[in-house]
Each structure stands twice: as C-alpha cells, then as structure tokens.
Image (cartoon, rainbow, N blue to C red):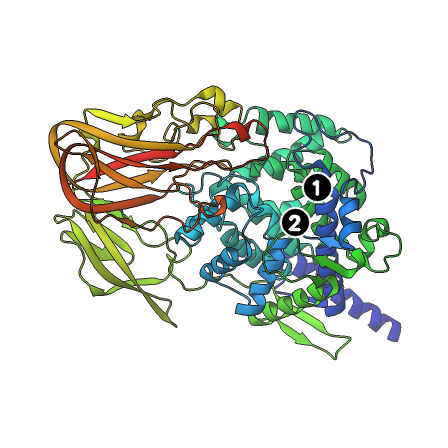
Amino acid sequence: MKTFRIAFVVFLLFVSFAWDNAFGQKTYKIKVSELRDKIAAEWIGQMIGNMYGLPHENKYVAEPGPEKWPYGYSKSLDKLKKYEGAFSDDDTDVEYMYLLQLEKFGSEPSYTQLREAWIYHIRDRVWLANRAALGLMHFGYTPPFTGSKELNPHWYQIDPQLINEIWAVTAPGMVNYAASKSDWAARITSDDWGVEPTIFYGAMYSAAFFEKDINKLIEIGIKALPANGRFTATAKEMIALHAKFPSDWKAARQEMAQKYYVNEPQMTKTIWNANLNGACAILAMLYGDNNFQRTLDLSCAMGFDADNQAATVAGLMGVINGMKGLPENLCLPIEGWKKPFNDKYINITRFDLPDANISDIIDRTLKATIDLVVSKGGKLSGKPGNQVLSINTEAAFNPPLEFCLGPLPQMEINKPVDFNFYTEANKIYNWSLVSGTLPAGLAFNNGKLTGIPTTSGYSKVTLQLDNGKQKISRDFNLLVRGTNIAATADTILANVRELNDKVLDSCWYTFGKPMYAKTVEVINDGITAGEGSVFYSLAAKTKIPKVDYYGYGWKTPQKISMLALHTGCLEEFGGWFTSLNVQYLDKAGKWTPVEKTSITPQFPETDIVFYQPHFVEYVICFDQVETKAIRIIGDAKIEGHWNKYTKQVSGFTSVTELSVYH
C-alpha cells in the first residue's frame, strides 16, 4: 500500500508537471548552484567563441570555410599566452561594461545612464552601427535615436547581436521580459529588422536555462519575433533549408548566401548584415546538433562576420549544457592553466574597464540575476549552499521613465508641423506642457506638436513626463525658421561638383552604393536621407590638405541671417569638416566673413572619428547680410586608415543638404 501511495503521488506530480508545461508555467525553479554553473558556461562559452572565431572574421564570403575541423584557436593562441588569460573584444567587453551599469544603477538602467557609460568607456575600436551610435551620443542624442534609421545609416548591421546577451542571461526563464529588454537595448545602435536577431537570441538565452533542445529553442526565439518580421521569415527558411539538406550544410549555406548576400538589396548588402549573420548562426546551431565543438566550427565556417556568431552561439550552448558541456581543451588551451582561461579577463579594448577574475564576473552576474528575478516577483529560498530561485515567468519589461533626446522639429514658417517628442520607449507615459509658450500657431497634446507656425524665432518650453508614480521635466528650445531659399538659387557653388566613382570604389566604404549622389546638385533638393541623398566631395587621390566649400548664388540680392548644414553618412577615413566658417560676396565681389557667428549644436570637441555623428544638422546664425552669394567653407578631415588604397584618398566632406534662411 505504501508503494502504491508513493507511485500515485509521483504520478500526480508528473501529471501536474506535464499540465504546467503544456499550458505554460507561471513559475520556474532552479538551484542557485545550477544557475551559477550556467552563467559561468555562458561567459566562458562566449569567450571561447570570440577568441576561437577571431581568425575567421570576414574571411569566408564567396565560399564557406574549409571543413578541416577543429579549427583551434589559431592566431588567437599567441594573445592568450601574451595576456595569460582571456582578452577582451567587442563580443564581451560591452557586456562587461553593462554588468558594471547593473551594479551601479540597478536591474534596469536607463538609456541616459547607458549612454554615459558608452561615452566614458568606449573611445575607439567600434565600427559600423556602434560607431555611428557613439558619434550621435557625443552630439547629444540618447537612444533610441542613436540607432534610428534616419540617423544611423548602419542600423541594419550585426552590432546589437554581439553586445546584448547579458539582458537575457540575467532574466532566466523570463522569456518575454528578456526579449523585450533585448529589443529595447538593441535600439541603442539599430532599428527595424536590424534588432530582430537580438530579440531572437534574447528569448533563446532566457529559455535555455530550462530547455535543452536546440530546435525547441529556435522555435521559442521565432515566437518572440514580430509575426511579419524579416528575420522571422529568415529563421523559418533556415529550418526549411536544414530539412531540405539534412546532411549537407554547405548546400544550405550556399542557398542562404545567394539570397541574403548575393541578391541582397544594394542599400543593405554588406558582410555584416544582421539578417545574413543571424541566418548563419541558425544553420550552425541546426547542423551542430547540440555538439559544442561542431557547432563552434560551423559558426566559423559559415563565414561573414564569423567571430560574432561564434561567440553568441557558444554562449547559448554554455547556458544549455553548463560547464560540463564546454570542452576542457578549449577552456584550458595553455599548459599549466588550472582554471578556465587562467581565471583572468584582461581588458585591452575599453577605457577604464578593470581587469577581472572570470570567477568574479560570474559571481557578480549571478548576484545581478538574483536581484532582477526577485525584483520581478521571484523568490530566493533555502539555506546557503542549497538555495533555490523561484522565477516569475510572466514578468514584463517596462522601460525606465526618461526623456529620449533626438532631433527637435525642423519647423519653417507657414508650413504644417506634425512632430512626436515621444518614442516607442516612452509613448506609454503621460506628456504635458507645464511652462513656456509654444510658437504661435502650434498646439501640444500628449507628446505631439501640431499646427502651422506663423512667426519665426525661438520659444522655450518645459515638458513633463509621468508614469503615475513619478514625474520628470525637461526644457526644450524650439526654433521656427524663416523661408528656406536654397531651392531658389540660380547657382550651386562647390569646389568639387562630381563624385569620383573610381576613387570611392577603391576605398573601404561601408554603405550601400546607392546612398551616394553623383553630383552636388542634391544639396538643395530637400531630401536628407535614403538613396542618392549624400554627396561626397571625393576627388583625386592625394594627401595634401583640402578645403571644401558649398553655397549658392542668386541674380538678385538676398537678405540672409541663417544657414543649416545637414551632414551625410561618414566613413572611417573621413567625411567631416574640422572647421567651419560662413562667407558672403560683398558689393566689391570679394568673399567676406559674416559677423557674430554661432553654431548650434557646437562642432565636436575633437576631429577624432569616434566623435563624429552621421546625418545631423548644424544651425549657423550670424548678423544679417544682403548678398548675391553665400557659402560655408572649412577644412576637410584627412583620416588615417589601415586600407592601403584608402590611405591615399584626399580629405572630403559629406553633405545631404544646405539650407538658407532670411
């Protein structure tokens, strides 16, 4: 009878477990010791993937990598010996920086706080969307504007996939929370479908603490994505390719690369494309069949930006299988090491990020995880050494209350205004105008500015944001401009009138070729983004200093007191002014400087590439002049570059629009 009762209780427990899993559990439980083991394997797995994949970065494009496995650490082995431990790279260093912010500000730091961390710690060694976001941060913008399609021309690149796993690692079993927070964080650098692989990974990482089947995890990742999202369709296609070629990963890779690289639209065709590299990772996981070594080698062999997908996938495999799933030879690649990577994480990439013991990073991440889980309705129980963490799987992520700072409305007298101060991150909160007077003709309603301005000039207003618990306010200085007369000019003035295509093609440029306009004629067409919107004053190959100017001429005199320069996308090797002045043609036909010039916002404090923002506007005010011609003039930056052909390119500037106002 006793045996029967025990069997019956076990049966009821099994039925209860099956019922909960079939219809969704509200609570998961995990031993803290197991949680730490999985967090440890995630950090060490990422480090393995990052350093293992580095020698294969951008190496295999036309064809996949050779099936001469295992690849091994290759060139990274020398660095491992040099630093006597793991070394930082962009697949782990930003996440380590984010860990510091969790410790400093709590489980949900704000965009503003993360921006401050970027500006302080990240001073070089960033590329693509990360570099573009950093430049916009220095300009004064906060996320999500730093990742928006309108301002960050690299919004579709791989960047957020490699720096945001920590948001899911600290939210085990909280799949919806992890996916939403990963989406929110990805928008620091990216937008639209460029953030979707990050959401996908966020859901998988969170679920992997309780689910080992890689196929089920991929399905969980897909369910977290927008139903009609681009990467949703891509992920499903990778599953179909695996089914079509169950034992031929190269055939699947060929079809994938043909569609998402060879036939990718020119504006988003790069080897760093987020959708493309996300597809590579899914194929690696499917063909890897939960074998760490095989999955790691496949992540490299799939090619393109291989080290990033290798790190992310290896970190996920770590969460799934824990430390026992990490091959010892990869954790201890140097003779004499007793702990994974000698228990050292050496910072070689970020300003003022301290070196650390890997075990310390793991313990700090564990604490951040427990703090977050408890703050979201979870519970820590049991005695030390045998503690259990109960997790509220229905926890939701609500973005911190804050103003997100981006471009103010570009308003012109007698033209309709329809402008949102809010973003999706703070749209859910209440907005109100608490002081100041709006420009005549405009109205403000819950974050939206509408109407037709009737008077030019500046108007200072204070807006308030509240979420029912707290209120914050911020001042804004709104500008209504006069009429833009650039389009009425009889002549466009410029020292370079046509883009030198041959020179551009010889360079290491990183934007879709349709972005570049053929001639300077685009600078007064009213279009500041998209295909054919950006003019580069790229001429001959020469190292001599270069001065650029842009302006307009009219047959009859014009009264002018304001110009607005809207810059375009910038390259690693230049594209920006290092100085800027305004000159007008006086009655004697001589170019003369205007008086009392002010530029808003101010030019970057340095001409270093990492401070330069893409697609921003500088408003230049001065004492009114009456003239038949006016121009901006300044020095074009000549930036050094590793590419031998790019090194020979002269300085140039990037402009989308130059506006002129009475």
Q: Please tell me which residue lies in front, 2 or 177.
A: 177
Q: Image height check: is 170 above or below 268?
A: below
Q: Please tell me which residue lies in front, 211 or 231.
A: 231
Q: Image height check: is 227 above or below 423?
A: above
Residue 99 occupies which quadrant of the picture? Answer: bottom right
Name the amino acid type tagged 1: Leu
The answer to whether residue 560 is seen in the rendering is yes
Going from N to C along the chain, the mark reached first, 1 or 2, is 1
| Element type at mark 2 | loop
Spatial CA distance of label 1 from label 2 is: 9 Å
Name the amino acid type tagged 2: Asp
Identify the residue at image location x=78%, y=30%. 247
The number of callouts visible is 2
Where residue 83 sits in the image (x, y, percent)? Answer: 75, 53
Identify the residue at image location x=80%, y=50%. 81
Label 1 neighbourhood size at 10 Å, few (<14), some (14-19), many (20+)?
many
| Element type at mark 1 | helix
Q: Which mark is on residue 54?
A: 1
Left or right of 564? Residue 513 is: right
Q: Residue under circle 2? A: 89
Q: Please tell me which residue lies in front, 242 or 476.
A: 476
Q: Please tell me which residue lies in front, 230 or 403.
A: 403
Residue 34 occupies which quadrant of the picture? Answer: bottom right
